[in-house]
Image (cartoon, rainbow, N blue to C red):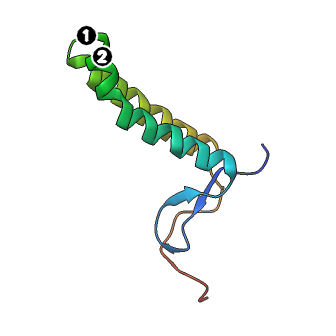
Amino acid sequence: MGKPWFGPKRYGIGLGPTSPAGWMVMLAYVAAMVGALPLVRALGWPDWAFAVIQLAAVVLLVVLVILKRDPRPLKWRWGDRR
């Protein structure tokens, strides 16, 4: 499967980008979220198109995180303490 793009956070619970590919996915997600409204307005699309673009971005992000995550279990982490 290759190197995971997302891995467990050092503190707390959750996943974060751990490779350049993971950071690029996050950058594309933020660009889609920020650029959706100006795009919809510039093209004269109906307002519901904005919600569709954002929903698609969220679903794609979640799918990519699930597919490209580190297989270690999600649990609360305290940094470098063991």
Residue closest to the far bottom:
81
Side (left or right) of 46 relative to 10: left
Residue carrying label 1: 44
Quarter of the image with the N terminus in it? top right
State the image quarter where residue 49 is shown.
top left
In the depicted structure, whether residue 62 falls above or below residue 57: below
Disc 2, SS? helix
Q: Secondary structure at mark 1?
A: loop
x 57%, y 64%: residue? 8
- Distance (Cα) linking label 1 and label 2: 6 Å
Give amino acid for label 1.
Gly
For disc 2, the marked residue is: 42
Picture quadrant of residue 73: bottom right
User: Image point 27% across, 26% down: which residue?
Assistant: 51
Q: Position of residue 30 (x, y in %)?
A: 43, 42
Q: Is residue 8 left or right of residue 55?
A: right
Q: Position of residue 9 (x, y in %)?
A: 54, 67
Q: Position of residue 40 (x, y in %)?
A: 30, 19
Q: Is residue 69 left or right of residue 54?
A: right
Q: Residue furthest left?
A: 47
User: Residue at point 62% right, 48% down?
Assistant: 22
Relative to the observer, which residue lies in front, 47 or 67? 47
73 above or below 61? below
Residue at the image point whose x is 68% and y is 50% from the top: 20
Quarter holding the C terminus is bottom right
Do the residues under discs 1 and 2 have CB atoms within 8 angstroms?
A: yes
